[in-house]
Amino acid sequence: MDLPEILLALFIVVVVIVSLVSNLLVLLCFIYSTEIRKQVPGIFIMNLSFCNLLITVFNMPSTLLGIIKNHQPFGDWICQTVSFLETFLTTNTMLSMAALSIDKWIAVVFPLSYSSKMRYKDAVIMVCYSWFHSLTFSLISLLFSWVDYNQIYASCTLHLKEERERRKFTVFTIVFHATSFMLSLLILCFTYLKVLKVARFHCKRIDIITMQTLLLLVDIHPSVKQRCLVEQKKRRQRATKKISIFIGSFIICFAPYIITRLIELLPFITVNHHWGIVSKCLTYSKAASDPFVYSLLRQQYKKVLVNIVNRILKRDLYPSSGHNSSLDTENDYCLQRVS
């Protein structure tokens, strides 16, 4: 292993730890909170975190071992299984992000009819389509034996074994990335830009009302006016910042790898080994960042995590036994019924 490979291996170790902990926390919130389970976005976030967790457990360690050993880390059967999972899980995560953006678009642009346009049943149907779409391409790659260890990416991933199948593999790769990455990116851009347009419109209305109020309040202190103006600026930037994170993280993490996979279809181009691993590591970093981008930094998830921690600390500080234990159990049952 040279220095770049050592650094990339350490990077994957960090990503594995962060991704494992953060995605488990998201799933824990989903299991613990009845409110999150009842909400439509919770279905998409749960599916996204579940896929990211599987990528963390199966695909990341495989690539890490591939970097360390500099050859196929497992037997053919295990490597093909990991490659199959990579195609399935990566596609599923992309479509889950697209579904989340559609949900946000309907909630912001059509708030009065959101409950009828995005029902719980509709969310389940979208998740089922995501699984069917991902499973279709994964099975095709498995059927044509295009799942194997790829030295360029040090990963068990899509790989062309025989040159005579290059045309079929090229068509499959283009269609696969067009219906997963490009489709998801187009949906993200369309929906979030619509959301940004509505957010800016509401910010503009709030700014006009605020300025009219400040003009009427003649005796108001200049510092208060200054704080209001600063808050106006932050409000305008907040929506733009969030949309930039949603779309920007998707492009930064997935685009280098997708573009590299498309460029390597040309027979006269050879991809650099180090760049191949870097692009692969970028896709893994999305699994670690998704919990923070979509859930853990939201106030609702923070409250659930605080409640979980408080409950654990309460049990540690005041251990119950005998009669008190039965009372606590009864109280917990009543609280669950009320919630």
Image: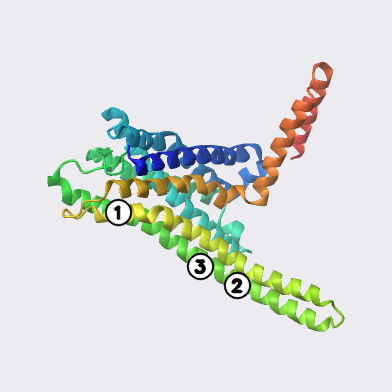
Q: Which residue is mark 1?
A: 260
Q: Could you classify mark 3 by the number of other residues whose Cα lies within 10 Å: few (under 14), some (14-19), or many (20 or more)? A: some
- Name the residue at 59% across, 49% down: 295
Amino acid beneath label 1: Thr
Q: SS at mark 3?
A: helix
| Mark 2 or mark 1: whose residue is earlier in sequence | 2
Q: Which residue is mark 3?
A: 193
State left or right for residue 68 relative to residue 37. left
Q: SS at mark 1?
A: helix
State left or right for residue 185 relative to residue 81. right
Q: Between marks 3 and 2, how big is the CA–CA gap?
A: 10 Å
Q: Between marks 2 and 1, how big is the CA–CA gap?
A: 36 Å
- Name the residue at 34% across, 34% down: 68
Image spot of residue 157 (x, y percent): 30, 41
Amino acid beneath label 2: Arg
State left or right for residue 80 relative to residue 129. left
Amino acid beneath label 3: Leu
Residue 209, picture quadrant: bottom right
Image spot of residue 184 (x, y percent): 42, 57
- Name the residue at 51% across, 67% down: 193
Residue 79, picture quadrant: top left
Q: Which mark is residue 200?
A: 2
State left or right for residue 156 relative to residue 194. left
Q: In front of the other: label 3 or label 1?
A: 1
86 in relation to 215, above or below: above
